[in-house]
Image (cartoon, rainbow, N blue to C red):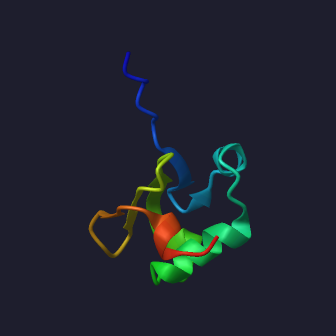
Amino acid sequence: NNPEPQIPSILINDGKMMKSQMKEIKIDAKMLNKILDYLQVKSVCEVIILAIDENGKLFYQTKTSSAKTIDNIYNEVNL
């Protein structure tokens, strides 16, 4: 039996924080700002989408850049 793959949690959608998703995976606004700092993104408003899966794989796209992934954001940013 293979476990069902987890759908990534969307933390930012169209420039807005998805607070219920953030709460579900225990990421608060301060942690999200650390991630944005690491990505060199100045504001949530600049982000089209930012999602993270249970292994810390991060997918994001800003209004001025193409989509990018980071294999494990937890290894990159001390949350």
53 vs 19, left or right, is: left
Quarter of the figure that contains the C terminus:
bottom right
Residue 51 in percent (x, y) is at 47, 53
Q: Quadrant of residue 69?
A: bottom left
Question: Is 12 situated above or below 21?
Answer: below
The residue furthest top is 1
Residue 43 in percent (x, y) is at 57, 77
| Residue in the image at 55% along x and 73% along y | 35
| Residue in the image at 55% along x and 70% along y | 45
Instruction: Using the image as rendered, state which of residue 61 and residue 64 is in the foreground.
Output: 61
Question: Is 78 situated above or below 13?
Answer: below
Question: Is 32 situated above or below 16?
Answer: below
50 vs 63, left or right, is: right
Instruction: Using the image as rendered, state which of residue 18 and residue 79 is in the foreground.
Output: 79
Question: Is 65 situated above or below 1?
Answer: below
Instruction: Using the image as rendered, state which of residue 26 and residue 75 is in the foreground.
Output: 75
Q: Quadrant of residue 30?
A: bottom right
